[in-house]
Image: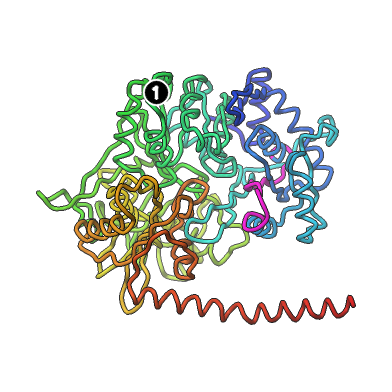
Amino acid sequence: MTNFRTFTELVLERSEARKDADAFVFLPDDARGSVPQHLTSAALDQEARRIASWLQDRGAAKRQVLLLYPAGLDFIKAFTACLYAGAVAVPGPLPAEQGQHFARISGILRDAEACAVLTDSANAPAISAWLAAEGFTDVACLATDDPAQGDAGAWHAPSLTPESLAFLQYTSGSTSDPKGVVVSHGNLLANEAAIQRSIGTSAESVCGGWLPFYHDMGLIGHILHPMYLGAQGVLMAPFTFLKRPYRWLKMIGDYGMTTGGGPNFAYDLCVRRVTDAQLETLDLSSWTTACNGAEPVRAETVRAFAERFAPAGFRPEAMFPCYGMAETTLLVTGIPRGATARVLDVDAEALERGELADPRGDFATRSLVSSGIARDFEIRVVDPETRVEKPGGHIGEIWLKGDSVAAGYWKRPATNKEIFDAEISGGTGVQDTEKQDTEKQDTDGQNAGWLRTGDLGALHDGELYVTGRLKELVIISGRNLYPQDVERAVQSTDKALGAGAGAVFAVETDREHLVAIQEVRPAAVATDLHTVASNIQSFIGKEFSIPAGNVLLVRPGTVRKTTSGKIQRTLMRKLFLEGGITALYEVLEPAVQELIASTEAEAEAEAEPEAEAAATDAAQTLESVV
């Protein structure tokens, strides 16, 4: 679609062509209905030049700049300014309070080696104080909404190539610590083109949504894609959606939005929370692409949303199940345009063996939703242990190649060798070391290896079916169980159990034990928590033929999720073993209770030397002061 070498060149051209047209509209979170905020292309261009001049004056070109903003237009101005300055933007979550949030941002700041932090006037004092407290004395902080900072007339175009870094996308960490994905201008242009080809967007499209701006789907899909197209974007804050899902759907109708979406849980939330009276005010007929990705897509959700919002003009073929990740910039696969979501019913027992097989009479089945086809990637399904490619209809790890695949994680050469440069045994790749040395590079200089996604799936009739995460697979008695299947079963037993608000995993003693942690609304329980837990145990035993000896019913908000709504099962397992989960009601096997106690004891033993060292340091400091 474009002949631009860098995304910066593209944005400069789009700004000149659109000028007084709205680039973005932002709807503030105000129940009283505050006035929408408009940002024209000309105003965005002028503000970006001003902020970029400040960055260039401080030598930020080709260096990392951390962006910490509440949802709003200031973030877009700052990100665009980094593109204009030739700096590497590092979007991050705004620290809301002292503690874990600041700890995460401190880690990102150190890892990214940021030379500056951009924010707004409301948050600049707190962020400046945090920088000083953390010892980041050489990191400048700028409130970009101060018009006195920078001079648009002093800005000059940066010298960039397709290989130049555009931004670092820090992963949300559903199974590991956050890592910065290195996204080049070439990667970004390639993926934006892939998105456009997949969903058929154009300059007449209206894109947007509510996802966090520092999340890959929110940033690349809802902000950078309309910039790529030269189209309008319409946005709101995540909290606005979570508080009143109706406002998202109302925004779609009010602005004639065509493209936008979110994780599966967002569609569930709309089905549950939008009232009949609200439904009558909605018009979803303009919505041609309702992207559903970032977590497993549920067949029940697809059907329920289409049925619930059909009176508002929503068409089943508008639902767009897709698959992607930060490591591929964003999109990998999506269903063909105009097609309805394909649901494949398979035999549950065969699925546990790693095969897709037709249902057998009255035997248990599982429903899988297709994530569609890949137009711009090569996809292989590979045995993660032997690295041998699997035939169609067999489950393995999803491996990818394509121009959108990032060069790797920032400053993680060993991890990059393992994850971004994998070789298929006896297939496209080779294991022979001497051949690897000579065949590692393609003619364009990119890594010839495959990206290991860590996701499990299968190819069937040319379409990709994602079944789960490799590290989260529950293996009990030699059977492979997908935690999301067990979680759904748990949540189906009682209306008081929150949909998408549970975590299932396994812990090991002399054998594997299943653990189910589930949020519950006590006021909605018709009987008592003991009965709810007993019903969960009975249903899991019946549905999956495994013992469910460990059930914890917890308060809403206990189950940890990433910014995109993915359940952080690995973190929940860690918290459980460390005794960090407070339950309203729990049933635990004796062996699991002993395991928790021993893990807590080990954690305390490891912490004692650190505590003693800290106490000694404090005493020495006090003595020197006295």
Region in magenta: 83-102
Q: Can residue 404 be seen in the rendering of this structure?
A: yes
Q: What kind of residue is marked 1?
A: Leu
Percent x, y for residue 61? 75, 46
Q: Which residue is disc 1 drawn over?
A: 279
Name the residue rendered at 48%, 24% in the picture. Answer: 250
Above-or-below relation of 429 to 40: below
Percent x, y for residue 436? 47, 66
- SS type, badge 1: helix
Name the residue rendered at 40%, 62% in the picture. Answer: 471
Image quadrant for the C terminus?
bottom right
As drawn, is 584 to the left or to the right of 358?
right
Q: Can residue 426 be seen in the rendering of this structure?
A: no
Q: Let me know if residue 269 is in the magenta part.
A: no
Q: Nearer the viewer, residue 131 or 48?
A: 131
Percent x, y for residue 514? 32, 66
